[in-house]
Image (spheres, rainbow, N blue to C red):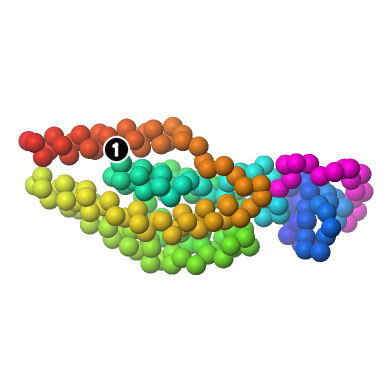
């Protein structure tokens, strides 16, 4: 109740939002529990779009929690774009935290400088109170981040070599880095699939198209370099 009253005072939720707790027979407006407020008349039946308590920080509109995409899309896009999509993945998850928690951060730059911010992102996802109320997180944030950073840095430095073969090797070395994001994406998917109503996968967006274009350009540069 203290949390709900705090959310109400901040304006994050309104007195008319429906809430539910263990032992309650039905959903009730928040105003039913707030001291000093007159509860409005209860609806004769609950709306079909009622969301569960753990969705309350998403505005009660069925939004997905973090970047909710199929595992296959994450792997395929990462391989197709030589890891560029992983930067987008990091950006989108930071953006979710910024919007939900009203953080004063710049998700775009946290994606661009991912090696500096991926550990804090994975830690934020693992320790997120909202998602852990739904499903406990069990992945090793520090270990996954360290492995992803190691492969990314090795690939980056090799990719700067003047020798084409070494440069291409550096690009290829970064490809398996997506493996270390899979446990996190699996957890995000598990959380979203545990809520009701279940949200839809995040749609293909302009960001996806940009990643694909950059990936195709990278492929072309590699092919040209090998044939030079």
Numbered disc 1: secondary structure: helix
What residue is rendered at 30% in x and 46% in y?
Answer: 79
What residue is rendered at 22% in x and 50% in y?
Answer: 172
Q: Which residue is mark 1?
A: 215
For the N terminus, the quadrant is: bottom right
The percent position of residue 121, horizontal first and vertical second, equals 46, 56
Q: Nearer the viewer, residue 109 or 60?
A: 60
The percent position of residue 188, horizontal first and vertical second, equals 52, 54
* Span shown in magenta: 35-51
Q: Is residue 12 left or right of residue 70?
A: right
Question: Visible in this render: residue 34?
Answer: no
Q: Is residue 79 left or right of residue 193?
A: left
Residue 4 falls in which quadrant of the image?
bottom right
Q: Is residue 42 magenta?
A: yes
Q: Nearer the viewer, residue 122 or 45?
A: 45
For the C terminus, the quadrant is: top left
Q: Is residue 20 magenta?
A: no
Count how many numbered circles sit on residues in the image: 1
What residue is rendered at 37% in x and 51% in y?
Answer: 114
What residue is rendered at 61% in x and 55% in y?
Answer: 194
The percent position of residue 203, horizontal first and vertical second, equals 50, 37
Secondary structure mainly formed by the magenta segment: loop
Residue 227 falls in which quadrant of the image?
top left
């Amino acid at each position: 109740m203290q949390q709900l009253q705090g959310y109400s005072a901040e304006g994050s939720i309104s007195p008319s939002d429906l809430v539910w707790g263990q032992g309650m027979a039905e959903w009730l407006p928040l105003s039913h529990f707030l001291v000093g407020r007159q509860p409005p008349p209860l609806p004769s039946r609950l709306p079909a779009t009622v969301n569960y308590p753990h969705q309350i920080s998403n505005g009660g509109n069925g939004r997905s929690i973090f970047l909710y995409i199929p595992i296959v899309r994450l792997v395929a896009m990462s391989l197709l774009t030589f890891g560029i999509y992983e930067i987008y993945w990091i950006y989108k998850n930071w953006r979710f935290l910024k919007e939900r928690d009203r953080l004063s951060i710049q998700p775009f730059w946290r994606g661009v400088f991912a090696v500096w911010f991926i550990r804090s992102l994975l830690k934020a996802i693992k320790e997120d109170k909202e998602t852990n109320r739904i499903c406990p997180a069990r992945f090793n944030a520090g270990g996954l981040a360290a492995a992803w950073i190691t492969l990314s840095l090795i690939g980056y430095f090799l990719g700067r070599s003047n020798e084409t073969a070494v440069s291409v090797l550096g690009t290829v070395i970064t490809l398996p880095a997506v493996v270390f994001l899979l446990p996190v994406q699996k957890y995000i998917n598990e959380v979203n699939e545990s809520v009701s109503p279940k949200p839809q996968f995040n749609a293909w967006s302009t960001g996806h198209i940009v990643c694909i274009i950059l990936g195709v350009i990278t492929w072309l540069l590699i092919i040209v370099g090998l044939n030079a």
